[in-house]
Amino acid sequence: MSLFHPDLLKNSITEITYDDLQRLGVRGLLLDVDNTLTTHGSQVLTSAISEWLENMKRMDIALTIVSNATSKRVEPFARRVGLKFISFACKPLPIGFIRAAKRLGIPRRECAAVGDQTFTDIIGARLAGVRSIQLLPILPERQPLLRFKRRFERYIIAGYRRKQERNAKPR
């Protein structure tokens, strides 16, 4: 298992199904905010994502936010969507994910981090011993550093897809 490859890759959060989570043995989701639940800096959810969150709650999937953003950014958003949060999580260090799993009262092996960045969300999840679900970003980044990292992510995601295709072929 690669440090850089997620357990699952989806185009958007609304593509994650209860069946996907069952296959992974996941009962709790540790959700990133920017470019995962909403666009960078936004406090607004689309109706599709809002509905997806409500469906996950109805299916007894525990949810919390784990973000590298400041409390000033995350707290109003978390309050608006009705979730607890950990801000300034220091991803890819595992501490934010570990704290979030403890807060949910779910073993780390039954949690999955959901985010759009390989170098924070996926590596951090691996280091913390939680599953990982990578999403493609909602919108392209404007920040030079993030745009730079996205170039490398494209190669990592392409490698992940090749690996999935090889594993799917009958032998």
Image (cartoon, rainbow, N blue to C red):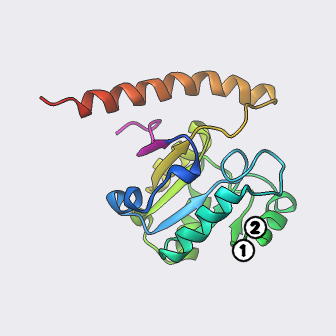
Disc 2 to disc 1, how far (Cα)? Answer: 6 Å
Horizontal and vertical percent for residue 115?
Answer: 60, 48
Q: Would you call the spot at circle 2 few (<14 residues within 10 Å), some (14-19), or many (20 or more)?
A: some
**Residue farthest toward the right in the current orientation of the protein:** 72
Q: Which mark, residue 78?
A: 2
What is the quadrant of residue 97 in the picture?
bottom right
53 above or below 142?
Answer: below
Image quadrant holding the C terminus, namely top left
Does 9 sit left or right of 137 as displayed? left
Q: Would you call the spot at circle 1 few (<14 residues within 10 Å), some (14-19), or many (20 or more)?
A: few
Q: Is mark 2 on a helix, strand or loop?
A: helix
Q: Which amino acid does label 2 sit on?
A: Ala
Q: Which amino acid does label 1 sit on?
A: Gly
Q: Mark 1 points at which residue?
A: 82
165 above or below 12?
Answer: above
Horizontal and vertical percent for residue 131?
Answer: 44, 54
Highlighted magenta segment, given as a residue range: 1-9
* x 58%, y 45%: residue: 12
Does 20 sit left or right of 78 as displayed? left
* x 42%, y 70%: residue: 107
What is the quadrant of residue 159 in the picture?
top left
Does 35 sit left or right of 124 as displayed? right
Does 107 sit left or right of 103 as displayed? left
* x 43%, y 62%: residue: 18
171 above or below 25?
Answer: above
55 above or below 45?
Answer: below
Q: Is residue 66 visible?
A: no
* x 56%, y 54%: residue: 94
Q: Is residue 56 visible?
A: yes
